[in-house]
Image: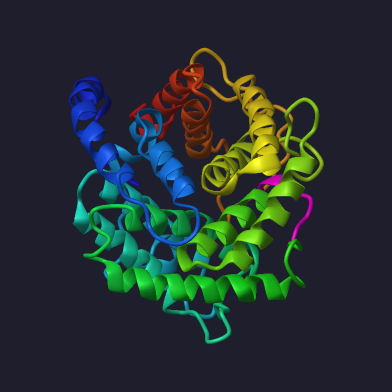
Amino acid sequence: MRWSLIAALIVVCFSVGIIAHDSIGQTLQSRAPSGLGPPGVKSFVRIESSLPVFDVLYRYGHNDAASNGAYGPNVTAPRSAWFLEYQRAGGYDIIAGALRNEPALIGEGLRMLRFGLAREASDGSFPGSAWPFHGTALFLSETAPALIVLEASRYTSQFSGELRWQTGRMRRAVYHMIRVVGGPGKIDDSTKSHRFYEAAIAIGAVGILSGDRRLVRWSKHYAWHAVGMERANGVMPEDGGHDSGYQALGMVSATRYLALLGTGKLGHALYGTLQRGEAWERSRIDSKGSVNQSGDTRTFGCRERDPTGHCKTVFYAPIFSSLAHWATTSGDQRYARLARLVWTRSEYGGH
């Protein structure tokens, strides 16, 4: 990700950007796509365009793809061994472009999504891509919500043809993803809490985009299961223990799901689960924005490596994203301040 402003300019641009952001947020929130639950869509757009989230996620950055839309390792990967989930980076550009009134950035994001979706087979699979369930769910968990924001923006008519094409491909991918694990509610790795939230938002968001109520119903199985996995102290287990980064990743998906589809008993349960989980996450961050990784099961001490062979380490982006999303969801501005502190401490904040 390339960041266009150095740390010395952040304070100045922060104050100027508030004015522009307010008008952008109002424009987005005045629209909502037809289909399932417009109030949920409006709530989701309100959170994504809120100042705490906008400041640490969307104000400055963008992702650069190759000319054909390939991103990350897919730039050089053969069709027999590529990674659909890396193309989810386009979802960031779509939301950032919609919020910043940059249609060229939206187009860049859609091109990244198209690279992946164009490789979809007629049965909804992605030949050559690893992890038929997890890889697809991870891709859709970030790209389907991005298309919801785009559909709710002033640019929906400009990109209407691409929206329809991508939504159709996403819907087909979800059905295949669920078939490969044996049906709705099942998953490829039940030891990781965040994957249930990932699946919930992926399936539910595609259901909203496509107007498929069955997918919305199925998504609730995953959300309920994730709620049930949380421990009394707020830990959302990863491989039997805790992990600051992966818990944050799961909570980003969970807060988005809460906004879009968290009604009734499920909404109440999700809110309480997130309240405990975010409090635990907050306990892992010191006054300088550093993250305590002691005892983390997956991102401490190079216990795991990513598909490119690099050690997994502290997940700054999901952590400050999770805190910012919760600040808006709960109204507790302590989390907004903490999100900005972690963002500043990370490379994303210019330090």
- Image position of 344 (left or right of 214): left
Q: Nearer the viewer, residue 66 or 201?
A: 201
Location of the C terminus by quadrant is top left
Does residue 137 appear in the picture of this structure?
A: yes
Instruction: Find residue 181 and report its horizontal and vertical position in percent.
Output: 74, 70
Instruction: Find residue 65 and report its horizontal and vertical position in percent.
Output: 32, 61
- Residue 309 forms part of the magenta stretch: no
So how many labels did they put on this image? 0
Q: Please, which colouring scheme is shown?
A: rainbow
Is 105 situated above or below 290?
below
Residue at 80%, 27% in the rendered image: 232
Q: Which residues are magenta?
A: 188-194
Q: Nearer the viewer, residue 217 or 315?
A: 217
Query: Which corner quadrant of the image does residue 267 belong to?
Result: top right
Is 347 situated above or below 257?
above
Is 177 situated above or below 98?
below
Q: Nearer the viewer, residue 173 or 154?
A: 154
Q: Nearer the viewer, residue 6 or 44?
A: 44
Instruction: Find residue 343 and report its horizontal and vertical position in percent.
Output: 42, 28
- The residue sitting at the bottom extreme is 122
Residue at 50%, 22% in the rendered image: 335
